C-alpha cells in the first residue's frame, strides 16, 4: 500500500514535473485536497476552516477536526490510522464527484457558522439577550441599535 512518506522526501520540487505514479498522485492530492494528519494536539483548527472557506475538501483525523461542527463523510473524510489516511488521500484525489460534494458541503458549513453574516447574527442574539435582561422584555437588538443612531 502507498504511504505518504514520499511527501516528506522533497520529491515534489516546484518547477519539476512529477515523474513517477506516486509523485503524480501526491501532486494531485496536494492540489486538490487539504490533508490534516494530526495525531496529537489542541487548539482551533484554522487550517480546516480555511480549506472549507476555499471550497477545498478535507481529509482529517478525529483529533484534527476536533471541536469543529463538521460531520465526517459530509464535510470531511475521516481517517484515524496511517494506512486508512493514505488510502483516503488516494481515493479522494481520484473521485471528482466526492471531491465536489465534500468541498461544497464544507463551504456551506463555513458560510453558515463562520461568515460575517453568521457572526452578525450571533452578535445580535447576544445583544437581544442583554437587552432582555436590562429591559425585562425582548426588544429586537436591531431596533434598539437603529434608535440609538443619530439622525442628520
Image (spheres, rainbow, N blue to C red):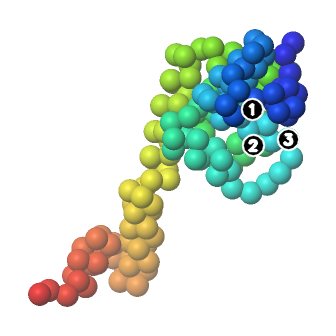
Pointer 2 residue: 64
Residue 16 figure quarter: top right
At which x and y percent is residue 61?
77, 36
Answer whether residue 72 is visible to the viewer in this image: no
Residue 45 rendering spot, x and y as whole percentages:
68, 50
Q: Secondary structure at mark 1?
A: loop
Residue 139 left/right relative to 89: left
Give 106 or 89, whichever is nearer the viewer. Answer: 89
Question: According to the image, label 1 marks what residue?
Answer: 13
Which residue is located at x 65 percent, y 22 percent?
A: 28
Within-10-Å neighbours for mark 3: few <14, some 14–19, many 20+? few
The reply, left or right, for residue 97 in relation to residue 20 is left
Crowd around label 1: few <14 · some 14–19 · many ≥20 (10 Å): few
**SS under mark 2:** loop
Nearer to me, 40 or 132 = 40
**4 lies above or below 121:** above
Q: Which residue is mark 3?
A: 39
**Location of residue 37 by image quarter:** top right
Residue lying at 70% horizontally and 42% vertically, measured from the top left: 65
Question: Where in the figure is residue 102, as x and y percent of width and height?
Answer: 55, 28
Point out the tag, 2 or 1, that comes first from the N-terminus: 1
Counting the numbered discs, the total is 3
Gap in Å between the C-alphas at discs 3 and 2? 7 Å
User: Which residue is outermost to the front?
Assistant: 15
Q: CA distance from mark 2 to mark 1?
A: 27 Å
The mark lying in front, picked from 2 and 1, is: 1
Measured from the top left, where is residue 113 in percent x and y? 49, 50
Q: Earlier in the sequence, mark 3 or mark 1?
A: 1
CA gap, disc 3 and disc 1: 26 Å
Query: Crowding near pointer 2: few (<14 within 10 Å), some, many (20+)?
Result: many
Amino acid at each position: 500500500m502507498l504511504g505518504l512518506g514520499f511527501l516528506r522526501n522533497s520529491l515534489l520540487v516546484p518547477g519539476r514535473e512529477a515523474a513517477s505514479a506516486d509523485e503524480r498522485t501526491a501532486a494531485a492530492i496536494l492540489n486538490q485536497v487539504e490533508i490534516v494528519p494530526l495525531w496529537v494536539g489542541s487548539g482551533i483548527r484554522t487550517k480546516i476552516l480555511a480549506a472549507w472557506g476555499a471550497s477545498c475538501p478535507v481529509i482529517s483525523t478525529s483529533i484534527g477536526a476536533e471541536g469543529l461542527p463538521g460531520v465526517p463523510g459530509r464535510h470531511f473524510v475521516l481517517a484515524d490510522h496511517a494506512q486508512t489516511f493514505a488510502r483516503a488521500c488516494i481515493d479522494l484525489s481520484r473521485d471528482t464527484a466526492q471531491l465536489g460534494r465534500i468541498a461544497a458541503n464544507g463551504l456551506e458549513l463555513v458560510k453558515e457558522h463562520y461568515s460575517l453574516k453568521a457572526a452578525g447574527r450571533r452578535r445580535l442574539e447576544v445583544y437581544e439577550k442583554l437587552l432582555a435582561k436590562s429591559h425585562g422584555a425582548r426588544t429586537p437588538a436591531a431596533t434598539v441599535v437603529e434608535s440609538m443612531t443619530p439622525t442628520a
